[in-house]
Image (cartoon, rainbow, N blue to C red):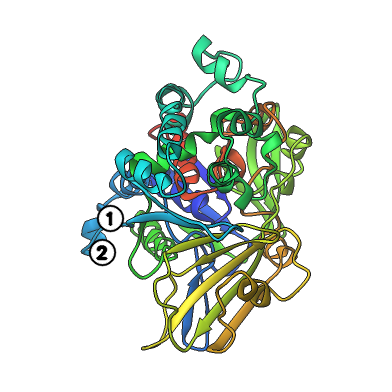
C-alpha cells in the first residue's frame, strides 16, 4: 500500500519507520530541510542543546519503536537509554526544596517527608490512586486504537469524568508545594489545571513507576537514528516539501497535494497539526494548540555545581532549568524555560530566583513562543486541554476521512516522547501489514 506521511517530527519518523517495516511503500514529506521537529538540536559557539525534550518517561516506547522497525536501540548505538536518579528538583518560594526521585515509592515518601511530617504518605497515597487508571487506560486507550463511540464502562467513567485536576489537587493536598509538584508537568506544557481532566494526573504515577531516562549525547540523537532507519527501510524522504491539503474522492483519500503537484496515496498519516490541512481542519476547529514557553539556551564557561538534571523554580515567572546539553571541555550547556510574568530578561529572572549564569556566559540562543510556532507552523506541545471534551475532539489514530490517520503531539493526550511514540504505534496497529 502507498502511504504518505505528512510531517517529519518524531511522530512522523516513528510512523514511517513502523509502516515501512510492515511492508508498505512509504513516502515522508517534511516542509523543512531537517527532520526531527522538536526532537532535534540547537548549536552555537561549540555548544549544543536539545531543542525539545531532554529526557523521556516509559523507555519501553522508544525501545519498542526500534525493535519493531529493525535493529534494537542498544545494537544500533552500542549502549542503552540511561536512567536518571531524579525526575526533577523543585525549589519553592519559601526556600524549601524537594528532590523528586523516580523508580521508588519509598524514596518519594522520604523525599516529601523532608518538607514536613506526614507529607510523604500523602504524596504516595495520591500517586497510588492512579494505579487503576493507568491499567485501564493503558489497555484500552494508550495502547489500543480506541473507538470514541464504543467505550467500555470503566474507560468511559474516566474519560467522561467532570473532575478536573485543579479540584482534585485542592481536595487532596492542603500544602501548596505538593500541589505545585503534581501540577507541574501540565503547567510546564502551557495548560491551566482547571481544564485538565483529573485522570491525566497519572503522569505522576508514570514518573514514579518508570522514572525518567535520557540518551547519552542528547535526545536529539533519536531523530538522526530514525532518519538512518528510514533509509534502511527504503522510505522515500522529501524535504522542503509542504503538503497543502488532502485530495479526497467519495469520502476517501487518494492523494496529498503539494506546491509542486499531487502525490498519490492509498493512506495518509497526518503527523502535523491537522489545521494545516484544510480537509482535516473542520474536524479540529474546537481545539487549540498549547503554546510553547520562552526558551533560552545558555552556554557557560564553567558548570554550576550540584544542579539536578532538571530544576523547577516555582514563582511568577515559573522557570525550568535543564542541564543536559553538550559543551566544550570545562563548560556547561543549559536550557531555561519560562512561563508566566516575564517582565525582565529570563537570565535576570533566573538569577533573582537563585541561579546566576550571567557572569560565565559564553553563548545564548533565545527563542520566543512565536519563533517556535513559526518554525513548526504550530505548537510542538500539541493540543491545549480545554476540559474533558478535549480527549474526544482530537484526531487519532483514525480520522473521519477514510484512509487518513493521525499521529504526533496533536493526536495524543500529552506532548512528550512516550505519548507521541505510542501514537505512531497505534497508527501502525490500525493500518496493519501490507
Q: Residue at x 40, y 26 (%)?
A: 131
Q: Is residue 21 left or right of residue 320?
A: left
Q: Where is residue 315 shown, x and y percent of the image? A: 66, 58
Looking at this view, is 303 or 278 the one in front?
A: 303
Quarter of the rendering containing residue 195: top right
Q: Which residue is mark 1?
A: 73
Q: Is residue 404 left or right of residue 369?
A: left
Q: Residue at x 55, y 74 (%)?
A: 355
Residue 365 appearing in the image: yes
- Front position in the image: 32 or 410: 410
The location of residue 421, given as percent across then percent down, is: 45, 45
Quadrant where the C terminus lies?
Answer: top left
> Marks 1/2: CA distance?
6 Å
Secondary element under disc 1, as helix, strand or loop, is helix
Q: Are marks 1 and 2 in contact (CB under 8 Å)?
A: yes
Front in this rendered view, residue 71 or 268: 71
The relative height of residue 420 versus residue 53 in the rendered view (above or below) is: above
Dot 1, how many residues are within 10 Å of its Cα: few (below 14), some (14-19), or many (20+)? some
Amino acid at each position: 500500500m502507498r502511504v504518505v506521511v505528512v510531517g517529519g517530527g518524531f511522530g512522523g519518523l516513528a510512523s514511517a519507520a513502523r509502516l515501512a517495516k510492515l511492508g508498505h511503500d512509504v513516502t515522508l514529506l517534511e516542509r523543512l530541510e531537517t527532520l526531527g521537529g522538536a526532537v532535534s538540536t540547537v548549536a552555537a559557539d561549540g555548544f549544543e542543546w536539545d531543542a525539545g525534550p531532554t529526557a523521556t518517561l516509559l523507555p519501553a516506547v522508544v525501545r519498542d519503536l526500534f525493535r519493531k522497525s529493525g535493529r534494537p536501540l542498544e545494537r544500533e548505538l552500542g549502549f542503552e537509554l540511561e536512567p536518571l536518579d531524579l525526575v526533577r528538583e523543585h525549589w519553592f518560594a519559601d526556600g524549601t526544596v524537594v528532590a523528586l526521585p523516580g523508580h521508588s515509592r519509598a524514596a518519594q515518601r522520604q523525599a516529601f517527608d523532608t518538607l514536613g511530617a506526614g507529607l510523604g504518605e500523602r504524596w504516595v497515597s495520591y500517586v497510588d490512586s492512579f494505579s487503576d487508571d493507568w491499567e485501564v487506560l493503558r489497555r484500552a486507550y494508550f495502547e489500543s486504537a480506541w473507538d470514541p463511540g464504543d467505550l467500555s464502562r470503566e474507560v468511559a467513567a474516566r474519560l467522561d469524568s467532570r473532575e478536573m485536576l485543579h479540584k482534585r489537587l485542592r481536595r487532596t493536598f492542603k500544602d501548596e508545594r505538593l500541589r505545585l509538584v503534581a501540577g507541574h508537568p501540565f503547567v510546564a506544557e502551557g495548560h491551566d489545571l482547571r481544564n485538565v481532566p483529573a485522570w491525566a494526573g497519572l503522569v505522576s504515577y508514570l514518573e514514579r513507576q518508570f522514572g525518567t531516562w535520557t540518551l547519552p549525547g542528547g535526545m536529539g540523537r533519536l531523530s538522526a537514528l530514525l532518519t538512518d532507519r528510514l533509509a534502511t527501510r527504503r522510505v522515500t524522504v522529501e524535504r522542503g516539501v509542504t503538503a497543502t491539503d488532502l485530495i479526497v474522492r467519495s469520502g476517501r483519500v487518494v492523494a496529498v497535494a503539494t506546491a509542486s503537484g499531487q502525490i498519490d496515496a492509498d493512506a495518509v498519516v497526518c503527523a502535523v497539526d491537522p489545521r494545516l490541512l484544510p480537509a482535516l481542519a473542520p474536524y479540529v476547529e474546537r481545539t487549540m494548540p498549547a503554546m510553547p514557553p520562552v526558551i533560552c539556551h545558555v552556554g557557560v564557561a564553567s558548570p554550576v555545581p550540584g544542579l539536578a538534571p532538571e530544576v523547577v523554580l516555582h514563582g511568577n515567572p515559573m522557570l525550568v532549568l535543564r542541564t543536559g546539553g553538550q559543551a566544550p571541555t570545562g563548560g556547561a550547556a543549559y536550557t531555561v524555560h519560562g512561563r508566566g510574568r516575564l517582565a525582565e530578561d529570563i537570565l535576570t529572572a533566573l538569577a533573582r530566583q537563585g541561579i546566576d549564569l550571567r557572569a560565565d556566559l559564553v553563548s545564548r540562543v533565545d527563542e520566543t513562543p512565536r519563533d517556535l510556532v513559526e518554525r513548526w507552523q504550530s505548537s510542538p506541545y500539541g493540543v491545549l486541554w480545554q476540559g474533558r471534551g478535549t480527549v474526544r475532539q482530537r484526531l487519532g489514530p483514525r480520522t473521519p476521512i477514510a484512509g487518513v490517520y493521525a499521529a504526533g503531539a496533536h493526536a495524543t493526550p500529552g506532548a512528550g516522547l512516550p505519548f507521541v511514540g505510542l501514537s505512531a504505534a497505534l497508527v501502525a496497529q490500525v493500518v496493519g501489514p501490507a
